[in-house]
Image: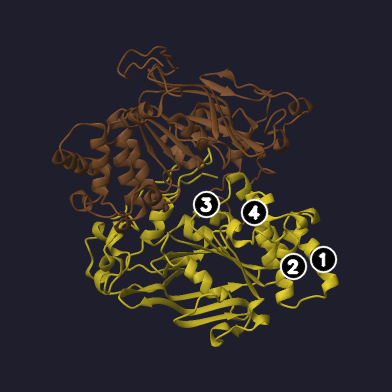
Chain colours: A yellow, B brown
Amino acid sequence: MSMDSSLLRVEDLTVRFSRRGVPELTAVKAVNLELAEGEALGVVGESGSGKSTLARAIVGIQRLTSGTVEIDGHDLSRYKRVPLHLRRKVQMVFQDPASSLDSRQRVGSAVAEPLTVHSLLERSERKARVAEILQMVGLNEHHAARFPHELSGGERQRVAIARALAVSPQLIVCDEAVSALDVSVQAQIINLLIKLQDQLGLGLIFIAHDLTVVRHLAHRVAVMHQGRIVETGPTAQVYDHPQHPYTMALLSAVLPAHPDDRLPDRIMLNTDVGELDEPTERTPIGGCAFRSSCWRWKENGEHAICATTEPQLDEISAHHLHACHFPTAKAILPAGGQ
Amino acid sequence: MDGISGLSTPLNAVEPANGRPTVLELRNIDVLFRRRNQSVHAVRGVSLDVGAGEAVGIVGESGCGKSALALSVLGLLPPSAQVSGSARMHGQEILSMRRAELRKWRGNQVGMVFQDPMGSLNPLMKVGQQITETIRAHTAVSRKAARRRAIELLEMVELKDPKRHVDSYPHELSGGMLQRVMIAIALSCEPSLLIADEPTTALDVTVQAQLLDTLDRLRTSFGMALILITHDLGVVGRVCSKIHVVYAGRIVESGPLGAVMRSPEHPYTMALLSSQPRVGSKSREPVRSIDGYPPSMEDPIVGCSFQPRCIHATDECSHSDPALVGVGDGRRAACIHVGALDRRL
């Protein structure tokens, strides 16, 4: 990615939660990201990996502890309150449209609301714009008069996307936007996002725990573990030639649902991620945060460096980076699936 | 009803194709929810058999009635639900049992695991107590023996450090660990059938994979039958040997897992399979999707319920309601065009 074409640049982003009497939690730790116009970045990781906090920080609804978020050349982290004309550039779509939409607001008014807030278009022009956006997301003007409860889950998510598109953003951040949908409907929304992006040149950050969905959508992928990006690169590179043991474990846990796909070789984590209940283990002091779960650490003879030095993101090939002291390319997904 | 204990000879033993004795036999189960002026026909004439030790997947999308079906069998639906048909377990009719009888039967014969373990467990009680409570409700054992049994069960479900966690409170455990506790409770009376409703849906993928391994091991070692209810074909594929595909309250296709996945007979199954996102896809490759949305269960369904979304639909499909008919090799499908379709479209 060349520097000048970047739509989003996140540098050294850290978000820390602290409250008296509770151990401090670093939800996002020194994350660097870049996104070009029209590009889709998938962010994968398990619950608690910090991916949602990262999303919120990019959109500006989560205060940063340190670092910068630059959109289209404007550093948002400089502002205490981001001005509206900059906010417009990034919009977000959440997981559950049933709760992110106002149940008493008709679809048309929900989609028009951002236009009002941002004082875009004359009142008279808004109706036409709403109809146009509804059409873009595969709905029609009849939907404008409906209430959210009269719609199916898939239609509601289309409305949420329409609302995000209303102010013509340059970047959309989707946090688990298809996770609550049924498979048959999920596919429609994935395809809609791909189409909209290609049509409008939108940047897309797609946060998900489902690796199969991300494979379809994303040009590039970033794997998060305990607040850090542990591997990132072009989607095909990362999926087919993973370097980090955590990426491999995630890929190995995918249960293929398509009849032509075979089960990947399972990797057993030393401990289930998320099943470490001692907070001291959750944030090991010094060393690699993945160490206690790492299946390769033991295999490799428990290298001392893993316990003492936190691995930094290293470039393995063009734009493919990993944070592991002992990366090994190991194919996890069975070859020849398609 | 007969009031005979589950140990007596089954009255109407049906031998399924695989030769195992039948544990559960459902015939024409119908579930109708009535609310003020509307009614929801959630389950429409479902019949199926579950053999001893067999792992059966019930797959469908949200709102298709798969959970209502399970709850109806367990007698756990609210009074607003009208359940009709016949559900026999070891030959004994369940649907006509009285509440007290049903409660006793449930604990001894069927275990249940739901999606949200945090919502099913009492947050103010140690997990060990919640297991011993169940054990002591169904068997006459001392407190001490029950506790020993609880630790044993936690070991069986492969919870880490069971001796310590028997005294943990639910909030001290992760979602995956809690689900293991739920399974331990479900297994405490050694049921012959375990019903798991979306047991791994709320879990991370690596945790999910390990929990499914555990379930599978337990099924084999207890010789118990498993009904796995899920929307996720990957989960079914990992655990089950038989599958029932449910659409709009009705089984549209069923049969041995491999055969159904490889060569589906019903257009819905075909569409469902081909709309799965694939981990080996090309980047930016659209997913084949099914147009439209599942029907609302509040409106009466005329003709085939899948017809409005079906690419194979003909005029006939909009008025004739296809019956679930045998298509050979232990398979059934409900489509008037069965056998005449080009698969994978």
Disc 3 sits on a residue from what chain? A
Determine the secondary structure under disc 3. Answer: helix
- Give how far across and how far down residue A268 sits, in percent: 32, 50
**Residue contact between numbered discs 3 and 1, judged by CB atoms under 8 Å:** no
Task: Say whether marks 2 and 1 touch (CB < 8 Å).
Answer: yes
Is residue A218 something one can see in this rendering? yes
- Using the rendered view, name the quadrant where residue A311 is placed: bottom left
Quarter holding the N terminus of chain A is: bottom right
Instruction: Tell me the tag on residue A189.
Output: 4
Q: Earlier in the sequence, mark 3 or mark 1?
A: 1
Q: Distance between the residues labelled 4 and 1?
A: 24 Å
Q: Nearer the viewer, residue B232 or B36?
A: B36
Q: What residue type is labelled 2?
A: Ala
Residue shown at the point (70%, 55%) measured from the top left: A147
* Residue A80 position within the rendered picture, expressed as x and y whole percent measured from the top left: 55, 86
Chain identifier of the residue bearing label 2 in the image = A
**Mark pair 3, 4: CA separation:** 14 Å
Q: Mark 4 lies on which chain?
A: A
Q: Are marks 3 and 1 on the same chain?
A: yes
Q: Which of marks 3 and 4 is nearer the N terminus?
A: 4
Could you give the CA–CA distance between mark 3 and mark 1, rounded to whole angstroms?
38 Å
Q: Which mark is drawn over residue A212?
A: 3
